Amino acid sequence: MTADDLLARHRAVLPSWMPLYYAEPIELVSGEGRRVTDAQGRTYLDFFGGVLTNMIGYDIPEIREAVERQLRTGIVHTSTLYLIRQQVELAEKVARLSGIPDARVFFTNSGTEANEAALLMATNHRRSHQILAVRNSYHGRSYAAMGVTGNRGWSASPLNPLQVAWLHSGERLRGLLARLPEADRIDAAVEDLREVLATQTAGDVACLIAEPIQGVGGFVHGPDGLFAAWKKVLDEHGILLISDEVQTGWGRTGEHFWGYQAHGVTPDLLTFAKGVGNGFALAGVVGRAEVVESVPAISFSTFGGNPVSTAAGNAVLDYLLDHDLQANAARVGAILADGLRAAVGDLPEVAEVRGKGLMLGVEFVRPGTGEPDPALATRVFEACRAGGLLAGKGGLYGNVLRMGPPLTLTEDEAREGLAVLVDAIRSCAAEAVAR
Ligand SMILES: Cc1ncc(COP(=O)(O)O)c(C=O)c1O
């Protein structure tokens, strides 16, 4: 069967609102380490990892063997009505790593469900359905998760079980607080929070949900310390803090294990997904026992915490810690970030090279205007593919190239990918000038 046949069949039977990357979509048929091969036999270096989810890489023996061991027992599923050794072991690890004292863990199948569960806990704990969320956020595709998503392009319904008030993100480039000096942005964001509380809520708000670095939003973030400054105000009202670490968790930012740690504050609830299963459906919420235990009825996930996913999760976390991949993210991420800044940071089409560790973005604009240039971002994205590199796209205006490679990326692979990126950005920017 040709790729075209598969594309036609895909389009005939799957919904069009579930987009495919690239003008000529790719079917990936095998992978090893940080490389994947498509149905035509073309190999790519993968800097997006299935949206930051293949966190360790492809076909990692330790993870494959852990899953195969579980499969050989004959037990793929039992439901959480029975004791699951792998689930208990993983919960112990996640609780310990979370930095949250006396933590409890609830496993789900996706980041959406994790956030839904966190919102369930917070709203029950506070007996309030008022929520603070952040502009340009993405938290998932259920009604509540879409309800706290501040990105119109990813919010497919106005129906909302929550009452949501919106905060400025404090990011550097866009929005009302942009371009203020770092310290002033924190003060302005805190003032915004106080004003929103006083003018758009009844005061008894359940929680603030926020991503330490906005993923879909294009890897933008407020100044370090912002969450702590917000939390001081939240604490005056007993409002809880949920840190959505679906993209920022497990050492990806290099400098810390969790994104929240850049802010000098511990959240009440933390949600995780994507990388922890290295591709197996595994996600969850970890939080203070008192808050997690506020759920007043049975709440059960048929597949959440299943033996296969949690066997994968245990192997992933053991691998991550044994190989100190957080340190690797810091070291290899710096090669990429420094290399990009040196080679393309001065182009008028590049508004910003940003990010932390192995979570890096390049934002494209029309020179002189600061206007987003999604067409240029798309051309660079296609040129990377042509050069043998898979990257991602994002940002509120679709004008950000995103890199979130496996945390096992080597220095040589970083340099190889960097060369493709620089070439793609420079040649597409030059073409844009010639147009
Ligand atoms: C920060 C964040 N939260 C939640 C989600 C939703 O996760 P899922 O797609 O697993 O439901 C995503 C997905 O991209 C995300 O980036």
Image (tube, rainbow, N blue to C red):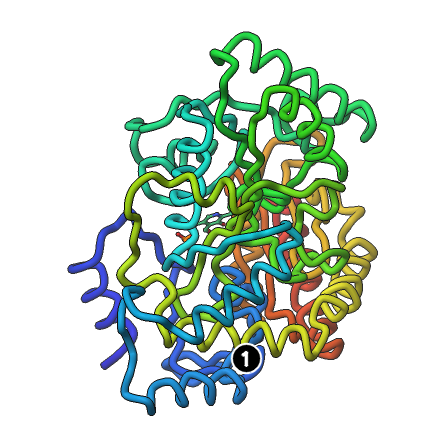
Direction top: furthest residue: 199
> In this figure, which residue is indicated by the disc labeled 1?
35
Res 45 quadrant in image: bottom right
Residue 2 lies left or right of residue 188; in this view the side is: left
Residue at x 36% of width, y 35% of height: 144
Residue at x 29% of width, y 79% of height: 76
What is the x, y in percent for residue 123? 42, 31
Q: Quadrant of the N terminus?
A: bottom left
Residue at x 77% of width, y 56% of height: 255
Q: Residues within 10 Å of mark 1 (few under 14, many from 20)?
A: some
Q: Is mark 1 within 8 Å of ligand 1?
A: no
Indicate whether 65 appears above or below 321: below
Residue 9 lies left or right of residue 28; in this view the side is: left
Q: Amino acid at mark 1?
A: Arg
What is the x, y in percent for residue 164? 44, 23
Element carrying mark 1: strand
Question: In the depicted view, which residue is nearer to us: 7 or 270?
Answer: 270
Res 12 quadrant in image: bottom left
Indicate whether 62 appears above or below 371: below
Direction left: furthest residue: 12
Question: In the depicted view, which residue is nearer to us: 255 or 238?
Answer: 238
What is the x, y in percent for residue 170? 68, 29
Q: Quadrant of the C terminus?
A: top right
Please give the count of numbered marks on the rendered protein: 1
Residue at x 64% of width, y 50% of height: 101
Res 378 seen here: no
Question: In the depicted view, which residue is nearer to us: 185 or 425?
Answer: 185
